[in-house]
Image: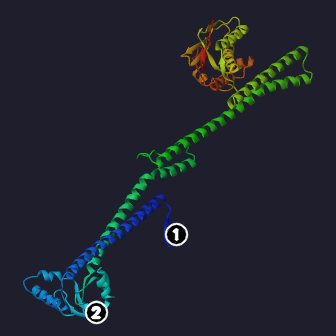
């Protein structure tokens, strides 16, 4: 597609501009080469002609010929050429043009191709000579135009003052230059055509990733974020590097948009869940307060209503605190990392569990050479505390729980909390880290749980650059494995 600009169409495609630029560069190069070759060829041919003329002049100047003897030599040369062959004398004077000028510059004797009659051409040549005497003194060949014919001439002065002018027509040189020009023009046109074809082909192949980019950009603008630019197959180039960079950028954009959509979905679900979780205790509190205001409660019922209001208020407070904790962890964790004695953290959490459920059997497995963990002590205490609180709430009070910490090569610590409770189904296990998830909603509400404990555990572990995973099956209990980075120096044990 082109746009008219004056009389010449201007190509809009990069491929067309690339081809035209290549053709123009080659055309300029061919033109310069043609000018140089024609100039050099002309100089060589004229130089050969000048050499022949100078040689003839030197031969003639070395003799003591006069006008009369020169006339006799010309006549003898004509007789020999009409006879058996040319003599050395005839060859010496066999030029395109030979003019003999007397002392007054008038053509006295003319010899052309062995003949002696004075022709009109020789007379015109004699008249066209600008200054025969100066030409004879210089001894250098000169170009003289007589009519429509150009000659390369040299002049020699004889001892008696006669000037002999010998000339050679430049028609042969012009004819050779003309043929050379035709050959160079033909070759140039062929080369330009080949270059144009090759440039179009190369440009189409090299710039094909750009067409892929346009198609990909169009598809992305229509909503297909999964489209990518095809990888080029012809070595490394700037276009291929651009394709790779754009693919990387598109992948990051798709990932960011996907994450944004996921975050939006989670936010909507979070708001829905939070509003639902707060609606129930608020409704309970409002109901008890309305009953109290209307005087519909006796003394015993008032005490029970106040206890329920206090419990629901505590439940909402816990919910708000946990929501704020999750928000801080997702936005700016604000954790202070330093070496932490994970053994002490685990022992304190187990002691708290024993204080709340003395009848629960607990197995504690802590090696003596356990290195310190690198993390925030308060955050790690909350991780272990939430895991044991999950066991306390969702398993029978007499079921066994095992808490173990392993040293994995001094680089990381592996915390394992296992219980012998009812376990989770595959569907529930997949949602265990979701916010407000409860395997047993009624029981969790009775104990004040909001379903955020495992979500907080996951957020804290990820903030510590660790991992958390659970393994469970119905009736087989639940095992939670947490991996945390270890500090460089191991803990010294007495």
Q: Is residue 22 above or below residue 219?
A: below
119 to the left or right of 316: left
Residue at position x 57%, y 13% in the image: 406
Q: Nearer the viewer, residue 405 or 47?
A: 47
| Crowd around label 2: few <14 · some 14–19 · many ≥20 (10 Å) | some
The label nearer to you, 2 versus 1, is: 2
Task: Look at mark 1 in the image and give the residue it sits on.
Answer: 4
The image's mark for residue 105 is 2
24 to the left or right of 52: right
Where is residue 451 shown, x and y percent of the image? Answer: 69, 23
The secondary structure type at the circle numbered 2 is: loop
Name the outermost residue toward the left. Answer: 84
Mark 2 touching mark 1, by CB under 8 A? no
| Crowd around label 1: few <14 · some 14–19 · many ≥20 (10 Å) | few
Q: Earlier in the sequence, mark 2 or mark 1?
A: 1
Q: Does the rendering let one see residue 354?
A: yes
Q: Is residue 24 above or below residue 396?
A: below
Q: Quadrant of the C terminus?
A: top right
Where is residue 310 shown, x and y percent of the image? Answer: 83, 19
Q: Nearer the viewer, residue 412 or 388?
A: 412
Q: Nearer the viewer, residue 74 or 208?
A: 74
Where is residue 324 shown, x and y percent of the image? Answer: 74, 28
Residue at position x 69%, y 25% in the image: 335
Q: Is residue 284 above or below residue 166?
A: above
Q: Which of the 4 image quarters holds residue 292?
A: top right
Where is residue 87 shown, x and y percent of the image? Answer: 11, 81
The secondary structure type at the circle numbered 1 is: strand
The image's mark for residue 395 is none
Q: Which of the 4 image quarters holds residue 311?
A: top right
311 to the left or right of 107: right
Give the alpha-carbon distance from disc 2 to disc 1, as whole Å. 66 Å
Q: Is residue 255 above or below residue 305?
A: below
């Amino acid at each position: 597609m082109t746009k008219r600009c004056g009389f010449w169409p201007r190509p809009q495609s990069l491929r067309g501009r690339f081809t035209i630029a290549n053709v123009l560069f080659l055309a300029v190069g061919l033109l310069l080469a043609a000018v140089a070759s024609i100039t050099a060829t002309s100089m060589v041919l004229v130089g050969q002609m000048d050499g022949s003329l100078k040689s003839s002049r030197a031969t003639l100047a070395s003799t003591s010929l006069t006008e009369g003897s020169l006339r006799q030599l010309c006549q003898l040369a004509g007789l020999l050429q009409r006879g058996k062959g040319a003599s050395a004398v005839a060859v010496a004077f066999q030029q395109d043009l030979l003019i003999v000028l007397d002392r007054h510059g008038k053509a006295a004797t003319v010899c052309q191709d062995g003949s002696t009659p004075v022709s009109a051409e020789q007379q015109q040549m004699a008249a066209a000579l600008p200054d025969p005497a100066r030409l004879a003194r210089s001894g250098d060949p000169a170009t003289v135009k007589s009519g429509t014919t150009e000659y390369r001439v040299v002049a020699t002065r004889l001892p008696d003052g006669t000037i002999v002018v010998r000339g050679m027509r430049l028609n042969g040189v012009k004819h050779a230059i003309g043929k050379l020009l035709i050959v160079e023009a033909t070759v140039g046109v062929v080369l330009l055509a080949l270059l144009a074809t090759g440039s179009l082909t190369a440009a189409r192949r090299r710039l094909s990733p750009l067409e892929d980019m346009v198609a990909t950009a169009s598809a992305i603008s229509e909503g297909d974020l999964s489209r990518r630019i095809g990888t080029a197959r012809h070595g490394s180039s700037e276009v291929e590097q651009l394709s790779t960079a754009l693919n990387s950028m598109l992948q990051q954009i798709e990932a960011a948009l996907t994450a944004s959509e996921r975050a939006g979905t989670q936010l909507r679900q979070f708001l829905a869940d939070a509003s639902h979780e707060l609606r129930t205790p608020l409704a309970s509190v409002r109901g008890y307060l309305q009953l109290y205001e209307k005087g519909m409660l006796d003394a015993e019922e008032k005490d029970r209503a106040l206890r329920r209001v206090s419990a629901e208020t505590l439940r909402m407070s816990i919910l708000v605190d946990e929501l704020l904790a999750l928000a801080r962890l997702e936005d700016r964790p604000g954790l202070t990392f330093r070496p932490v004695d994970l053994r002490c953290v685990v022992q304190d959490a187990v002691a708290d569990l024993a204080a709340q459920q003395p009848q629960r059997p607990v197995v504690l497995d802590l090696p003596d050479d356990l290195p310190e963990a690198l993390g925030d002590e308060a955050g790690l205490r909350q991780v272990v505390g939430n895991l044991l609180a999950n066991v306390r709430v969702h398993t029978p009070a007499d079921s066994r729980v095992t808490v173990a910490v392993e040293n994995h090569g001094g680089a990381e610590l592996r915390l394992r909390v296992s219980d012998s409770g009812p376990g989770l189904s595959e569907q529930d296990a997949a949602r265990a880290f979701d916010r407000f998830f409860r395997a047993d909603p009624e029981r969790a509400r009775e104990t004040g749980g909001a379903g955020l404990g495992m979500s907080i555990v996951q957020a804290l572990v990820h903030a510590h650059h660790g991992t958390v995973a659970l393994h469970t099956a119905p009736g087989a209990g639940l095992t939670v494995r947490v991996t945390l980075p270890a500090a460089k120096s191991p803990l010294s044990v007495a």
